[in-house]
Amino acid sequence: MNDGVYDTRFFREMCERLGDVIGRDLEASASGAGPVLEQRSVEAILTALDFERVVAGGADLGELAAVVLAHSNRLRHPRYMGHQVAVPMLPSVMNWI
């Protein structure tokens, strides 16, 4: 395991990066920019994630979050219409911390 994850400076930098990524995604989604869901194949998403690097522990958390959000259903998009989808509370995105 990478002991750097317990470095408070590293932690703060990652939280700030995640906040920026999530904030931009929320703004874009709420403004109606782009599609509600850009459906891609699993293979394309794994390629975008650079999944082997993620598994090896070398992924950049901000980039990883951006890819995940780009391939997720945008529940706050004005054109979103769903059925039987659990709507997450915004603070839950930081639950892993």
Image (tube, helix red, strand yellow):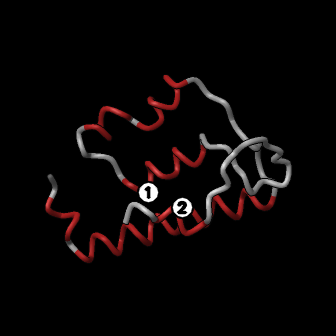
Q: Position of residue 36 (x, y in %)?
A: 75, 44
Q: Secondary structure at mark 1?
A: helix
Name the outermost residue toward the front: 84
| Residue that mark 2 sits on | 21
Residue kind at label 1, given as amino acid type: Gly
* Amino acid type, residue under disc 2 in the picture: Val
Q: Position of residue 8 (x, y in %)?
A: 25, 77
Query: Which residue is at 70% across, 45% downward?
Result: 85
> How many numbered discs sit on the rendered protein?
2
- Residue under numbered circle 1: 62
Where residue 63 appears, as percent x and y from the top left, is 44, 51
Secondary structure at badge 2 equals helix
Specify the quadrant of the image occupied by residue 4: bottom left
The front one of 89 and 32 is: 89
80 or 63: nearer the eye? 80
Residue name at image x 70 percent, y 64 percent: 27
**Could you classify mark 1 by the number of other residues whose Cα lies within 10 Å: few (under 14), some (14-19), or many (20 or more)?**
some
Q: Residue at x 32, y 47 (%)?
A: 59
Would residue 22 be found to the left or right of residue 53 on screen?
right
